Image (cartoon, rainbow, N blue to C red):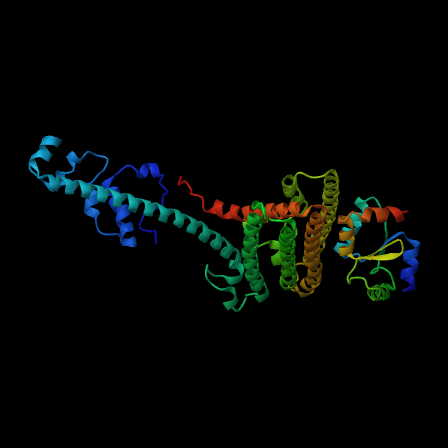
Amino acid sequence: MERIVKLASENGILIFSKSTCCLCYAVQILFKELRVQPRIVEIDTIPDGLEIEKALKRLGSSGPLPSVFIGGKLVGSTNEVMSLHLSGNLVQLLRQHAV
Amino acid sequence: MMNSTSTQFVPSRRMGIYEPIHQMSMWGDFKGNNCLDASTPMILEVDPKLDNQSEDTSHGTVGHSNKYDQEASKPPDKVLRRLAQNREAARKSRLRKKAYVQQLESSKLRLIQLEQELGRARQQGMYTGSALDASPLSYAGSMNPGIATFELEYGHWVEEQDRQLADLRNALQSTETGDVELRIFVDGGLRHYCDLFKMKATAAKTDVFYLMSGMWKTSGERFFFWIGGFRPSELLKVLLPHLEPLTEQQRLDLGNLAQSCQQAEDALSQGMDRLHQILGAAIAKQLGEGNYLPQVGAAIEKLDDLARFVGQADHLRQETLQQISRILTTRQAARGLLALGEYFQRLRALSSLWSSRPRESS
């Protein structure tokens, strides 16, 4: 959990994903299109990935990956990202916290 | 029903030309269906277009030279009676012809309907493996009950959609309909789309490939398919011309929405491409050994991802609809919903009209 908080605070835009998860890939593509570069943590490639996944669930992430943090706060999964984008608020939020 | 008669849809102009023999074969059959009184002999004899002078031929009277001689040689009341009978026969003939044409028209409509159902049943043929009237739920074996339920519910959904659109059209055309009433229509319409997305989510758990194939939709709709349904960006393009007049702010907001929508779609499309590759690779691993269970087992895990994609695409559709309705006034949103509904109705009609068109035999 501390790991998550640390990572979230260190990176303006953070995505927890899995290398095999194609929805995570779709979100990354979207961010790339919006010209931001998120920090991507693929939890299936790091040692304590499983713990991170459990901790993310406890945080109330809407379930499966990707888990997106912007400005240190949990935004949510693909649903939340898409809703934000369609309402026009995502770009603004990203610009505020982009490196 | 109409098997015994010609199924060519002859233009009425041709029908006006009286050909007695042709009449008998067409209208004779038809007469049997409709229990009109028996006056066929009169049809053959009488042609209202001709003068009365020639009508006596079949009655075999002795030599007649001209019209006035005829009338002079016969008692007047016989002539009058003959004239009345002619008129009566001609009238009945016209009535029969009219009824026949009407039956042709309704048969044509019924034919189009049947073609539509047949098309739908063929699509379902994968599941029911049988013809038009088999109830999917009565089938055991390879039948997938979750999908059968979905198809049934979808049929009802379309019927309800048609009803709502008809009501909405009436409401918009009436000058008395206020915004409060229109709001109810708009909210109801949006909710109806949400119901469809919920149905699809349930069906995806049963068979996601089925949802991806779009087999529950008409072939015309499938042409425009994108991840289990319509393209959200396409939605905006269809609606935009029908929402005018728009304020500058609305135009701006809709433009931004269109761009965001397109970006989201592109991202999902690329994610789907990657899923294609991964799934294909998983299935193609280590071919030639005969045993397929490990590879297929690994591929099945990927199907969860596929179901998520369909869900995400539906979510995009739903969000797009919600955003559009937020940007527009109630009346604009009502017009938009009507336009959208009619667009899909036309797509649905497209396939059946195409398949029911008269074909030239080469």
Image quarter hosting the N terminus of chain A: bottom right
Whether residue A36 sits left or right of residue B280 in the image: it is right
Q: Where is residue B327 in the image (x, y as percent from the top left)?
A: 72, 46
Q: In terms of depth relative to the viewer, which is nearer, B43 or B139?
A: B43
At 69% from the left edge and 57% from the top edge, which residue is drawn?
Answer: B311
Q: Position of residue B271 (x, y in %)?
A: 73, 51
Q: In which quarter of the image is residue B211?
A: bottom right
Q: How many marks?
A: 0
Q: In terms of depth relative to the viewer, which is nearer, B156 or B6?
A: B156
Whether residue B335 sits left or right of residue A48 in the image: it is left
Residue B286 in sight: no
Q: Where is residue B8 in the image (x, y as percent from the top left)?
A: 36, 43
Q: Quadrant of residue B302?
A: bottom right
Residue B134 in sight: yes
Whether residue B359 sits left or right of residue B82 in the image: it is right
Q: In terms of depth relative to the viewer, which is nearer, A14 or B129?
A: A14
At 30% from the left edge and 37% from the top edge, which residue is drawn?
Answer: B16
Q: Position of residue B294 (x, y in %)?
A: 69, 65
At 22% from the left edge and 38% from the top edge, which residue is drawn?
Answer: B47
